[in-house]
Image (cartoon, grey):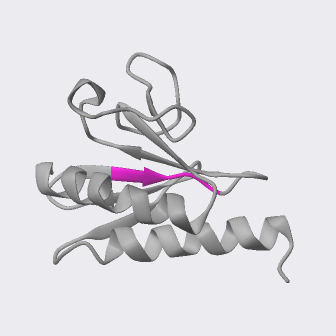
Amino acid sequence: MRSGCERIAALAKAADEVLLGLGDGITKVQRKQYSAYRRLQNFASLCPPQRTKVHVYLSLDPAEVDLVPDFTGDVTGLGHHTMGDMEVRLRTERDLERAHDLFRASYAAA
């Protein structure tokens, strides 16, 4: 059985693989505070895993998405190290599965 830190690190790696696998022409740029994923423009940012969750920021308008408390959030106007106005918090593999459609929407908009 994996420890909590190992489980969250594996979840971050799985999120990275999903983001890179969304389509052709995706590049990943490693920044000091996050990894940026871009097509024609940045569509997602993946932050290093925290103790209990992984944060992914997307270039989506939060007003056009049904936000789910403790899973997705509107970070418009809030200071954070990455790009994007929508935050997705991943705690489990199920959260990652739920986020696929959001990842695809952000990729398609880029």
- Location of the N terminus by quadrant is bottom right
Q: Residue at x 42, y 51 (%)?
A: 45
Point out the residue furthest to the top here. Answer: 77
Residue 26 appears in which quarter of the rendering?
bottom left
Magenta part of the chain: 44-48
Position of residue 93 in the picture relative to residue 83 (left or right):
right
Using the image, determine if residue 52 lies above or below residue 68.
Answer: below
Where is residue 80? Give x, y as percent.
Answer: 53, 30
Q: Residue at x 43, y 65 (%)?
A: 97
Residue 11 appears in which quarter of the rendering?
bottom right
Q: Residue at x 27, y 41 (%)?
A: 59
Where is residue 4? Give x, y as percent.
Answer: 82, 65
Where is residue 43? Give x, y as percent.
Answer: 27, 51
Using the image, determine if residue 46 lies above or below residue 12.
Answer: above
Position of residue 75 in the picture relative to residue 62 (left or right):
right
Magenta segment, principal secondary structure? Answer: strand
Of residues 69 and 61, which is closer to you in this image? 69
Where is residue 38? Give x, y as percent.
Answer: 26, 59
Magenta run includes residue 45: yes
